[in-house]
Amino acid sequence: MTPRDVLKLLAPTTRRLRLLASRAVLSLLNDGPGVQIVQVKLLAGEVRSGVERIQQYGLTTAPHAGAEAVFLSLGADRDHGVVIALDDRRYRLKNLRNGEVALYDDLGHKVHLTRDGIVIDGAGQPITLTNTPLVRAETPMFQCTGEIMDLCDSAARTMSGMRAIYDSHHHTEQGIGGPTTPPLEPM
């Protein structure tokens, strides 16, 4: 058997191996089923629909069309593919230091585990904690650059409003008949 004969015999297997993994671009995403189902465009205009997207446990995303993916043909069969990774260079955070981790989206929201601490950026939108009986901060100093509001859904008062009431507080003293002076130490 000549080397040319061997190459001819191996040609079908070689073709299948070359198609085992491909770059892909996301076209459509269905986030309703237990596993996301995507449509991706592969090389040379090949389109694959009904492809399962396998994600890491505890983390799920719904990327925009145009995100880039890795498509694997299980058993080297193009009709049995899965997408195992999706990234979107349009929104990815850049210039992280070695060891840093970030969770981010296309609107600018992010949770960034930096080498110097954790940074949460709400991108100008509210951050809501729900369904918890307690939020506790164990820290020697808690700083807030804005207002703090008490009972915000009912008889709302801000800390600065309560401070103003306390600092100007006076009333008629029983037995003396005259007004008291405001507190000696303002809040």
Image (tube, rainbow, N blue to C red):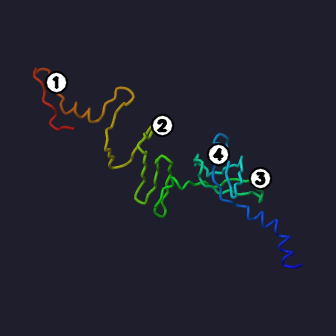
Query: Left of 113 or right of it: where is 21?
Result: right
User: Which residue was labeled with disc 4?
Assistant: 28
The location of residue 156, given as percent across then percent down, is 34, 29
Estimate the spatial distance between the alpha carbons at disc 2 and disc 3, rounded to whole Å: 43 Å
Q: How many residues crowd around disc 1 within 10 Å: few (fewer than 14), some, or many (20 or more)? A: few
Query: Left of 128 or right of it: where is 48?
Result: right
Q: How many residues crowd around disc 3 within 10 Å: few (fewer than 14), some, or many (20 or more)? A: few
Q: Secondary structure at mark 2?
A: loop
User: Which residue was labeled with disc 3?
Assistant: 79
| 2 and 3 marks in contact (CB < 8 Å) | no
143 is higher (above) or lower (below) than 176? below
Estimate the spatial distance between the alpha carbons at disc 2 and disc 1, rounded to whole Å: 41 Å
Q: Secondary structure at mark 1?
A: loop
Q: Using the image, tell me which numbered label, if any, was put on residue 130.
A: 2
| Snapshot quadrant of residue 31 | top right
Sequence-wise first label, 4 or 3:
4
| Snapshot quadrant of residue 122 | top left
Sequence-wise first label, 2 or 3:
3
Sequence-wise first label, 2 or 1:
2
Q: Secondary structure at mark 3?
A: loop
Q: Using the image, tell me which numbered label, if any, was put on residue 171.
A: 1
Sequence-wise first label, 2 or 4:
4
Sequence-wise first label, 1 or 4:
4
| Snapshot quadrant of residue 151 | top left
Of tags 2 and 3, which is closer to the observer?
Answer: 3
**Hey, what amino acid is under mark 1?**
His
Estimate the spatial distance between the alpha carbons at disc 2 and disc 4, rounded to whole Å: 31 Å
